[in-house]
Amino acid sequence: MDQVRKGVGTSLRRGGGERVVGTGVSVEQDVELLPELMKTINIPLAKLKANPSNPRVLRDDKFAKLKQSITDFPDMLNYRAIVAVTDIDGKYMVLGGNMRLRALQDLGIKEAPVMLADHWTEEQRREFIIKDNVGFGEWNWSALANEWDAVELAEWGLDLPKDPL
C-alpha cells in the first residue's frame, strides 16, 4: 500500500483505488472528522492579513470584476472561503483568497468566512498558495458559445476571446 501526503490527511492507494483519510481508522470515522477539518468560521477582516509573499495580483479591470462578482453573489463566499493560518502575531495570514480579502476590504464588508489550515506544514502551505491559483482546465469555447450567454459570461468575469463566440 502506497501512502502519499494529500490535502487534509494521507492518501492510501490499494489496487488502483484511492481513499483520502484524516486521522480516523475507518471511512466512517473520517467522515465524522470532515466537518471539524473543513469548518469555516466568520472572522472580522481586521483580524486577517494578506500574505506578503503572495505571488498573484489582480489589476484594474479584473479587480473591479472580482468586486462586482462579490456584490452580485455574496453567498458564493460561503462556498469558496478564504484559507488562512494563524500567524505568530495572532492574526490570520491568508494563503488562499488574498484578492478576495482586498476586494472585501474595498467593499466595506466587515467579516468573511475562513477555513483555518494551521495543521498544514510549511511545505503544504507553500504548495497550496500555488496550486490554489493554477488553472488546470481549459474552456470548451464551443460549449460556452452554444449553451451560455456571452454577456453573462463577461459579467461573471470570464475573459472571452476577441472573436465572437
Image (tube, rainbow, N blue to C red):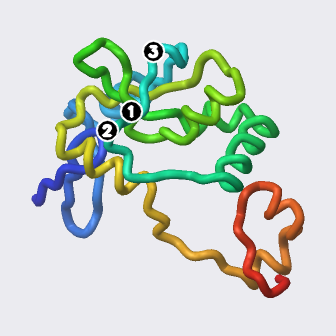
Q: CA distance from mark 2 to mark 3?
A: 35 Å
Q: Which residue is mark 3?
A: 47
Which residue occupies 57% across, 34% down? Answer: 102
| Callout 2–callout 3 Cβ contact below 8 Å | no
Q: Which residue is mark 2?
A: 27
Q: Is residue 131 left or right of residue 102?
A: left
Residue 83: give x, y in percent of width and height. 43, 34
Q: CA distance from mark 1 to mark 3?
A: 30 Å
Q: CA distance from mark 1 to mark 2?
A: 6 Å
Front in this rendered view, residue 80 or 18: 80
Q: Pick the quarter of the image with the C terminus.
A: bottom right
Which residue occupies 33% across, 48% down? Answer: 128
| Callout 1–callout 2 Cβ contact below 8 Å | yes
The circle drawn on residue 31 is 1
Q: Residues within 10 Å of mark 2 (few under 14, many from 20)?
A: few
| Callout 1–callout 3 Cβ contact below 8 Å | no
Q: Pick the quarter of the image with the N terminus.
A: bottom left
Which residue occupies 63% across, 75% down? Answer: 139
Q: Is residue 132 left or right of residue 61?
A: left
Identify which amino acid the numbered label 3 is placed on: Lys
Residue 93: give x, y in percent of width and height. 36, 28
**Which of marks 3 and 1 precedes in the sequence?**
1
